[in-house]
Amino acid sequence: MEASFWHERWQQNQIGFHQPEINPHLQQFWPGLGLPADSTVFVPLCGKSADMLWLRAQDYRVVGVELSPMAVDAFFSENRLQPDTWQEDGFTVSEADGIRLYCGDYFALRPQHLSGAAGAFDRAALMALPPAMRADYAQHLRRLLPRPSRILLVVFDYPQQEMAGPPFSVSEADVRALYGQEFAVERLHAVDVLAQEPWFRDKGLTQLQEKVYRLTA
């Protein structure tokens, strides 16, 4: 998918993927990862997610990466934060209250940008990408995170032929193929959410499961 697709989504406010509330799976399952207090948590393709505020409130430093300047500006302005901003390695970097956002290409990040990271939270990144891009995304994430590290991953799993993404369907077999060689993959939760998601029903889906995985390197 081209960068222009996501820029256009933000410009036209077509951001149904954005959740204004804290993700309940993050609140339920994150403590089980056992990451050290005051370590850094990475949020890829973060948008203006409120989940970053929750992670910061748990005493983690947060680093996110986001392609859209509109999303980054909205995160800080909507949360009444005044960030310091500078240029670094081709990114525009904004930071306030222990939350640092790199505005630019995810694939341009380097391990030094995630110094001290102990884990990552991926709610909307992997399933935002078509299957052809997933291997590169996962490989880069594995390269970025130091060892040991843990990832909390939330995805949708549905019959892909019933709907064109994004979000795209991500099966358990997909997760294990992408991460299983370097991470222990544990499914923590699976719930049928079709009844609660009228947008997906209107698109013609007959099944929709939300699944949560813990990945441990």
Image (spheres, rainbow, N blue to C red):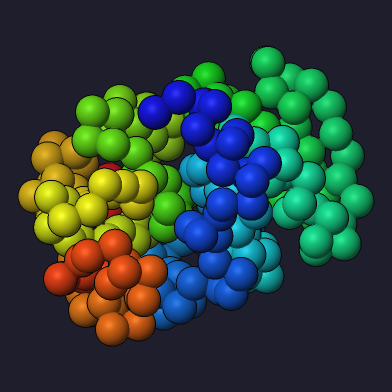
Q: Residue at x 12, y 40 (%)?
A: 177
- Number of numbered labels in the structure image: 0
Q: In the picture shown, does residue 55 fall above or below 194?
A: above
Q: In the picture shown, does residue 68 fall above or below 128?
A: above
Q: Quadrant of the N terminus?
A: top left
| x, y percent for residue 42 | 52, 46
Residue closest to the eye, 196 or 48: 196
Q: Residue at x 35, y 82 (%)?
A: 196
Residue closest to the eye, 205 or 176: 205
Q: Quadrant of the C terminus?
A: top left
| x, y percent for residue 97 | 81, 55
Q: Residue at x 79, y 21 (%)?
A: 87
Residue closest to the eye, 35 or 26: 26
Q: In this rendering, would 126 be left or right of 169?
A: right
Identify the image quadrant of residue 81. bottom right
Q: Residue at x 48, y 57 (%)?
A: 17
| x, y percent for residue 209 | 21, 70
